[in-house]
Amino acid sequence: MDAHKPVEPLYPEEVAPPPQPPAAPLLPGLPARLFAPQTGMLRALRHRNYRLFWTGNFLSNIGTWMHQVALGWLVLETTNSPFLLGVVGFAQFVPALIFSLPGGVIADRVNRRRWLLGTHAAMLVLALALAVAVTLEVITYAGIVLIAFLLGTASAVNAPAYQALVRDLSSREDVLNAIALNSMQFNLSRFIGPSIAGILVSTVGLVSCFYVNAASFLAPLVALTLVRYHAEARAGNNSMVAGLAEGFGYLRGHRHILLLVSIVAMVSLFGLPYLIFLPVFARDVLEVGARGLGYMTSASGGGALLGALVLATWQSERRRGPLVLGGTMVFFAGVLLLALSRNFYLSLAALVVVGGAMVCAVATVNSLIQTLVPDTVRGRVLSWHTMAYLGFSPLGSLLVGALAATWGTPAALALCAAGPLVLTGALWVGAPWLRQLK
């Protein structure tokens, strides 16, 4: 297949739906233009099923980000080792490298709502186990690593079905907006959760964050129970290996999508580890403590929220290629600035840039996959996106941790960001067809 030939749109035979009357605001006082059928920023929330799904995951993600802040602080206080902190990051995200692709096959075979009910229930039990172990003071470093791995495994097999359900519960014409709003809730929770966690860790104690996280999993369980969803799997009952091969064959035959997934993998491997090492910057480089760590994580989440707002207002007829390449370049430039900064407020500004640029790049790739890939293999191709985004991050955590043991965390992070920044600039110049993607 010619790498420069545009990918044909999915469902070209479909006729655009007839115009619908303006929807009433979901909440009193909200401007009606936010819900305009074709251009409203929040238009996907008109769908009851998607609204329930969005709300449940938003509340759960607040707890997840509180857990992340408390976990990083717990590991650093327990071990005082950036390298061992990187090992926990590896344990937490390496399951995405191992289990995301099988999770994609499962997502194309099973009832996605029931599968998500099971995986969320498993994560609730694991989060509660960590909270109880910390309360009883029986937690060990090995126990932290084990629970991080098990939570990562549940998340990895959950993610492809979760992403596919975003489209299933909205509508075809609203899919781009639904993806953007999903990214928006994730990053709004990333702004709120760490701010609460920073206050709780410095006042009540870090174990409170683990209990809140466990309780937060009740929200998606209730939401999924209330969702009206009866779609069954569309894929055949061939073997797991055959299912994986079919997904890879589709990816290999559509090299535009393969390159986009590779860009996400580069972001994950060389840039995303900055999140794992924020506790080191907060405690040792900037000396701002646990509350400062909460503000730093929130700054990244606030920037990501701004990026999601940009994506939510991006019209479907506009090119999305510049969002991918431009967002990737700005992301690595922001990570480099964070690594070089010794000023708390400059670091916060860098984190805002990093968060916004990452969403513009990674979520846009997700939206391209959702709209260009047929339903029968969508879960499996999305699993490659999941593996690229989450699966390469643990390798990056080990890389940065190993380099940090010799040169220090700031130098290690700067080195990992500089090369991809140059490479993405070369793609901008040398692959103009990539900038034309819609």
Image (cartoon, rainbow, N blue to C red):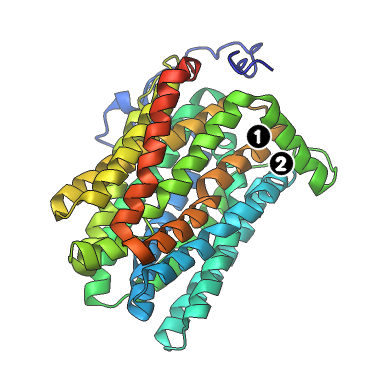
Q: Which residue is mark 2?
A: 108
Q: Amino acid at mark 1?
A: Arg
Query: Which residue lies most toward the right here?
Result: 238
Identify the residue at horizontal 38%, vertical 59% (top origin).
65
Secondary structure at numbered mark 1: helix
On screen, residue 167 versus residue 182, left or right, reads right
Identify the residue at horizontal 51%, vertical 62% (top origin).
90
Rendering coords of residue 427 (x, y %):
45, 25
Q: Which residue is mark 1?
A: 378
Q: Amino acid at mark 2?
A: Asp
Identify the residue at horizontal 58%, vertical 64% (top origin).
121
- Neighbourhood count class around disc 2 (C-alpha, 10 Å): few under 14, some 14–19, many 20 upward: many
Considering depth in this image, is 76 or 370 the residue closer to the camera? 76
User: Which quarter of the picture shows residue 324?
Assistant: top left
The answer to whether any part of residue 305 appears in the image is: no
Rendering coords of residue 332 (x, y %):
35, 40
User: Which quarter of the picture shows residue 46?
Assistant: top left
On screen, residue 150 versus residue 417, left or right, reads right
Rendering coords of residue 190 (x, y %):
34, 52
Q: Check if mark 2's residue and mark 1's residue have beta carbons within 8 Å.
A: yes
Considering depth in this image, is 386 or 112 the residue closer to the camera? 386
User: Compared with residue 52, is residue 42 higher up or lower down, i.e. above or below?
Assistant: above
Considering depth in this image, is 56 or 330 the residue closer to the camera? 330
